[in-house]
């Protein structure tokens, strides 16, 4: 039995747990199924179908093929201690067929010209050795995030994580998954991000309890998040998508391309794109439950889930339900925040109800219909206390996505797809003002978002070049977004909308294929993409992207991609309410002013904002030597150059009158006309001076409304590697993922640039993750070392540098075999995050109202223990 106290450490538990997993070391996100680990094979000559099924079952790798390709073909006898790749080579020898791994645990069998489904196919599709379709089933060509070419390869580095990896790492929802990716910043909209001075960015707010991707720290609005390739409606008042609301039990894998992708997907994909891909074929029912809690108190979690699915001759479906309740962490439950007023939450309490449905149905050999539907309801409770009173904020967010699609299989291996997407997200909030004797409603309202889109696209081969074909993907469509903030008692609130029409095209040109290599050129592929969007609000934007993939030898892959990206200003940035603030000058960095001196500051939306534009490029080198089959490593360099980046120019309110970087947005000794303009800018006026407003005491006017700043840059290096090998007592996997980032901003051409990365409430310059995984039969044991570099604070006269933050996580999982027994199909998992209970690095905040740590980079959860149990029938 595990016991925990409200405060302090549980040393006895720590010693017992360490003793029980003394041989357990760590893993990162790159291991998945292992394509290089060897096994003993002994297969006689047989049909190729049976041979591939046997390899799939023995290795655990998913093998996807069209039975029409395999008709009449046989595999020669083979045996030996072989890797999965070697076994596939043996099975396909002399058949004229090849294979390609589209991710770490999925191999696709290709014909001489890599045919895609045609209207004349009459044989079943087989996946992982199971015939999942009948005579009229067609094989869905595999789509990879980062390209619209079916079966294509992205020229940009790609992160792919399967559900098996989520479970082996002890990650329980997609929010936890993305926060463990070094390329992703934990700031923006994520649970535990607490109000902070300046905050780095207005998006650093946990408004709804959702979890949003924020690649490179460029904002959740600069990372496009898709579900099965479809856009979801934005969440809350910032342009974010709550990826954590998607039931992880129904997810097959998560693919992330941390590179500009506007030429392929449009606005928002400046930092990259993430695609949550659902399971296509699921048989049976899985029920699960999880309990977790922090050993220092708080964050007690109860979770229940149910997932069911079935397949039939011409289709299949999967449905998943999830319910979760989570207690808050209060300030008095951590020693370093007990100086804060009670009751204050430093991590919100929350609840989640989520349901997902996904269906695919073949319509003869002509077409296939699919439908994805997602419905979520998330609640959150936070409190912020001050001497004598506190605020209670309740939020309830409901989201809905409906995405039907119809794909037609045309002659000559072409497809035509028609997609329709509709989504809405309503984040309703209620603020109460409470004292020991009174309770009154402070405000209430809704951040309401709606989205709709349609798209028609075609894909297929243009012409044959040797054994490969030049392929084209092209399409047209339209999409729109609507946003409204409605406050109780207001006549209308704030609202805005945007509509755009678009057209895109992508061309993949295989100059040298792996089937016919030349000296010094194992493979050479070029890709060209372009997209034009025409907005009702600010006109037309066109973005291109070029890519190259070059394998000089089989063991080495070089990739490079260059492109232009854009992002339309969010509706909040354009249409949010305008506010005028009055501050005491000495509270915002002023010195040497007469007593009672004040600052008048404007804040809010700007309808005149222009689109953000960026140049992006990446270059990577991947090593996968045949002489060392267990080794895979990739090193990538990335560069993002923004122009016209939309930002709040004054990020640190405490230094408005002292930081030279803000000088161009501050007017000293304002004229009467300038004062009048500032006074009339806002729809509301807030006086925080404690005295009546006196225009004669205003010594400066500051402008903090959204503007297009001159420049924002992000450059850095990503590194991923893994080494896998067999032991006499199982399999061991070692892996490493790390990212180094340098980002900066310049507000105007004649002002100096200033650092973003490495400073408070912006991404740390270095994040890394190292570990090992041990597998034997149904038992897996894993652990992680997570490292985040320290950041610099400028909230004190002398800058402070926090220490780094390193934590150790470990998970032990046991899965019984599927069968008819009572304990068959059972999954038991015990995980501990931050095993040694590391506290977040502290800094000196300007007020005890703020938590004394950077909540965007470091966590206050402490040691967290969770136990999960699942049963599959």
Image (cartoon, rainbow, N blue to C red):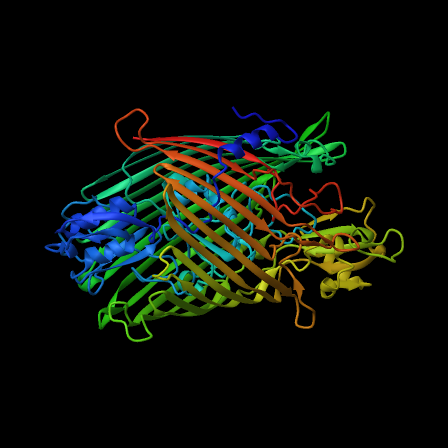
The structure residue drawn at horizontal position 44% and vertical position 63%, both measured from the top left corner, is 262
Looking at the picture, tell me which residue is in the foreground, 409 or 773.
Answer: 773
Residue 3, horizontal then vertical, whole percent: 56, 25
Looking at the picture, tell me which residue is in the foreground, 607 or 739.
Answer: 739
Looking at the picture, tell me which residue is in the foreground, 205 or 104.
Answer: 104
Residue 556, horizontal then vertical, whole percent: 38, 66
Looking at the picture, tell me which residue is in the foreground, 753 or 181.
Answer: 181
Q: Is residue 670 left or right of residue 22?
A: right
The answer to whether residue 764 is above or below residue 510 is above
Number of dots carrying numbers: 0
Find residue 666 and report its image quarter: bottom right
Q: Is residue 703 left or right of residue 245?
A: right
Residue 274 visible (yes or no): no
Which residue is the extreme one toward the right? 594
The structure residue drawn at horizontal position 30% and vertical position 45%, both measured from the top left corner, is 60
Q: Is residue 196 left or right of residue 425?
A: right
The structure residue drawn at horizontal position 47% and vertical position 38%, both measured from the top left corner, is 811
Which residue is the extreme one toward the bottom? 519
Residue 28 visible (yes or no): yes
Which residue is the extreme one toward the left? 72
Q: Quadrant of the C terminus?
A: top left
The structure residue drawn at horizontal position 49% and vertical position 56%, both measured from the top left corner, is 223
Find residue 441 and report its image quarter: top right
């Amino acid at each position: 039995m595990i016991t925990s106290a409200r405060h302090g450490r549980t040393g006895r538990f720590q010693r017992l747990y360490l003793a029980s997993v003394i041989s357990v070391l760590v893993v990162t996100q790159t291991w998945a199924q292992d394509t290089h680990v060897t096994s003993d094979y002994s297969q006689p000559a047989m049909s190729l179908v049976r041979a591939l099924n046997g390899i799939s079952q023995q290795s655990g790798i998913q093998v996807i093929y069209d039975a029409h390709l395999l008709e009449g073909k046989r595999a020669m006898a083979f045996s030996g201690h072989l890797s999965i790749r070697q076994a596939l080579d043996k099975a396909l020898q002399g058949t004229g067929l090849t294979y390609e791994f589209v991710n770490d645990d999925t191999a696709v069998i290709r014909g001489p010209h890599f045919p895609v489904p045609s209207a004349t196919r009459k044989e079943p599709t087989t996946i992982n050795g199971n015939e999942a379709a009948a005579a009229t089933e067609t094989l869905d060509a595999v789509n990879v995030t980062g390209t619209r070419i079916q079966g294509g390869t992205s020229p940009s580095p790609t992160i792919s994580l399967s559900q098996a990896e989520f479970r082996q790492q002890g990650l329980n929802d997609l929010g936890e998954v993305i926060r463990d990716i070094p390329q992703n910043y934990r700031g923006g909209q994520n649970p535990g991000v607490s109000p902070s001075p300046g905050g780095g960015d207005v998006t650093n707010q946990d408004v709804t309890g959702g979890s949003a991707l924020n690649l490179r720290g460029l904002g959740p609005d600069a990372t496009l998040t898709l579900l099965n390739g479809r856009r979801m409606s934005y969440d809350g008042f910032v342009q974010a998508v709550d990826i954590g609301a998607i039931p992880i039990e129904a997810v097959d894998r998560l693919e992330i391309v941390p590179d500009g992708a506007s030429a392929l997907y449009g606005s928002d994909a400046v930092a990259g794109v993430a695609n949550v891909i659902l399971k296509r074929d699921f048989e049976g029912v899985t029920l699960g439950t999880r309990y977790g809690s922090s050993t220092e108190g708080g964050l007690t979690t109860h979770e229940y889930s149910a997932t069911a699915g079935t397949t039939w001759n011409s289709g299949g479906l999967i449905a998943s339900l999830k319910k979760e309740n989570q207690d808050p962490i209060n300030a008095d439950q951590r020693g370093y925040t007990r100086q804060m007023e009670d009751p204050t939450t430093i991590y919100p309490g929350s609840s989640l109800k989520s349901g997902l449905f996904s269906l695919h149905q073949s319509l003869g050999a002509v077409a296939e219909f699919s439908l994805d539907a997602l419905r979520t309801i998330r609640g959150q409770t936070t409190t912020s206390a001050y001497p004598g009173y506190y605020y209670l904020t309740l939020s309830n967010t409901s989201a809905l996505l409906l995405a039907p699609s119809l794909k037609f299989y045309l002659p000559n291996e072409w497809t035509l797809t028609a997609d329709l997407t509709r989504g809405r997200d309503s984040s309703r909030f209620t603020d109460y003002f409470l004292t020991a004797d009174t309770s009154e409603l402070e405000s209430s309202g809704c951040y309401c978002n709606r989205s709709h889109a349609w798209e028609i696209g075609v894909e297929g081969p243009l012409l044959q070049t040797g054994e490969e074909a030049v392929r084209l993907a092209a399409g047209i469509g339209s999409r729109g977004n609507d946003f409204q903030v409605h406050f109780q008692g207001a006549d209308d609130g704030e609202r805005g909308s945007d509509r755009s029409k678009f057209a895109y095209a992508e061309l993949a040109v295989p100059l040298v294929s792996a089937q016919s290599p030349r000296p010094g050129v194992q493979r050479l592929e070029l890709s060209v993409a372009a997209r034009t969007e025409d907005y009702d609000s600010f006109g037309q934007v066109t973005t291109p992207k070029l890519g190259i993939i070059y394998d000089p030898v089989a063991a080495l892959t070089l990739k490079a991609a260059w492109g232009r990206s854009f992002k339309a200003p969010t509706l909040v940035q354009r249409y949010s309410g305008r506010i005028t603030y009055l501050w005491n000058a000495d509270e915002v960095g002023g010195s040497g002013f007469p007593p009672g001196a004040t600052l008048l500051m404007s804040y809010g939306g700007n309808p005149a904002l222009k689109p953000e534009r960026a140049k992006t490029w990446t270059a990577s080198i991947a090593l996968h030597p045949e002489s060392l089959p267990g080794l895979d490593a990739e090193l990538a360099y990335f560069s993002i150059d923004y122009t016209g980046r939309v930002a709040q120019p004054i990020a640190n309110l405490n230094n408005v009158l002292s930081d030279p970087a803000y000088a161009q947005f501050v007017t000293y000794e304002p004229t009467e006309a300038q004062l009048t303009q500032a006074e009339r800018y806002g729809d509301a006026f807030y006086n925080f001076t404690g005295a009546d407003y006196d225009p004669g005491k205003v010594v400066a006017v500051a402008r903090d409304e959204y503007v297009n700043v001159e420049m924002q840059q992000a450059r850095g290096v990503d590194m991923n590697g893994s080494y896998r090998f067999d032991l006499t007592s199982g399999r061991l996997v070692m892996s490493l993922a790390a990212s180094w980032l340098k980002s900066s901003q310049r507000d105007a051409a004649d002002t100096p640039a200033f650092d973003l990365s490495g400073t408070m409430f912006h991404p740390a310059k270095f994040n890394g993750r190292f570990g090992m995984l041990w597998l034997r039969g149904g038992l897996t044991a894993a652990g992680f070392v997570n490292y985040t570099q320290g950041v610099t604070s400028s909230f004190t006269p002398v800058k402070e540098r926090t220490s780094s933050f390193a934590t150790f996580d470990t998970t032990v999982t046991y899965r019984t075999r599927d069968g008819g027994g009572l304990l068959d199909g059972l999954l038991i998992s015990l995980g501990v995050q931050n095993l040694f209970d590391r506290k977040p690095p502290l800094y000196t905040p300007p007020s005890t109202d703020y938590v004394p740590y950077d909540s965007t980079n470091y966590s206050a959860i402490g040691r967290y223990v969770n136990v999960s149990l699942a049963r599959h029938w």
